Amino acid sequence: MQGTAALFFAASKCCSFNASYRLLSTPIIQISNGTFYRQHPASRPPPGQDAPPNLPLFPQLTLSLPSFSSPNQHWAILSPSSTVRTAFLQILRGQLLCFPPTARSYPYLLSDKIAAKNPKLRFPERAIEYVGFDVERKAFGGAYLSARYESRVEETDFSLAQYLTGITGLNVGEEYVKERLPDQDAMLQVVKDLELEPYFHKPVSTLSNGQSRRARIGKALLSKPEMLLLDAPFSKIVLLLVR
């Protein structure tokens, strides 16, 4: 791929597809001969300013990801460049400019099944959840949690339980709470699966770096996305989890 470092795609449990994998025909993401840019290729900088690099990303990319498979699939993406890897995930969520614009589509998100399930999931940024770990300081309000592990707990520090619901403001309204409160059984199951039970009622400021990573994954799972993108959860690996 000219202008873009190579990516290597691999299914987590098999090297190649075989007859035991049943892929549904409607893809959640469909890209056909698409080329992507961070800025419009025809844009020009103001007089006297240098133009930032705007190389084409993944020229003539063709990719199709199924909406469902049996058994379930977990995909790993390996790249020598974290910048390129993150750009690829942004492309999957509908970000960055696509040429031609019709080269990227989301057929499954436009289906009647999604409309009946939750109309908000018609939008890629809602249906495809992204959790990135390259810049940990952006999580939980802008500080490295590992650096705050032994910090003094303030009265206004919200708990892990509050963080998982997304309800972290003070004096929030009842309707706001109802709209965002996830199913309690589902939340407790996510907390159990991610081994966060001992910290459920503790302030997030006391979580270690590893615990905060699991908390962010848990919050993304509770939003019930159709696809979850984990950017560098284990240093160099990207996972695409398709339900």
Image (cartoon, grey):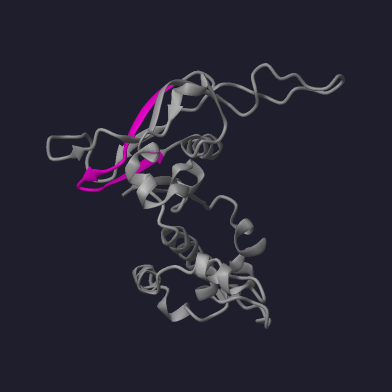
Residue 84 x/y as whole percent: 53, 34
- The residue lying toward the viewer, choosing from 210 and 218, is 218
- Labels in figure, total: 0
Q: Seen in the image, is 77 located left or right of residue 145?
A: left
Residue drawn at (17%, 40%) of the image = 21
> Would residue 143 be visible to someone looking at this image?
no
> Against 190, is 113 above or below?
above
Residue 11 x/y as whole percent: 28, 40
Residue drawn at (51%, 44%) of the image = 125
Q: Which residue is outermost to the right?
A: 48
Is 85 a magenta residue?
no
Residue drawn at (56%, 77%) of the image = 159
Main secondary structure type of the part rendered in magenta: strand
Is 71 a magenta residue?
yes
Q: In which quarter of the image is residue 23?
A: top left
> Against 115, is 23 above or below?
above
Residue 26 x/y as whole percent: 29, 34
Q: Seen in the image, is 237 located left or right of residue 113?
A: right
> Would residue 28 be visible to someone looking at this image?
yes
Residue stretch rendered in magenta on the structure: 60-77
Residue 178 x/y as whole percent: 51, 70
Q: Seen in the image, is 3 located left or right of residue 152?
A: left
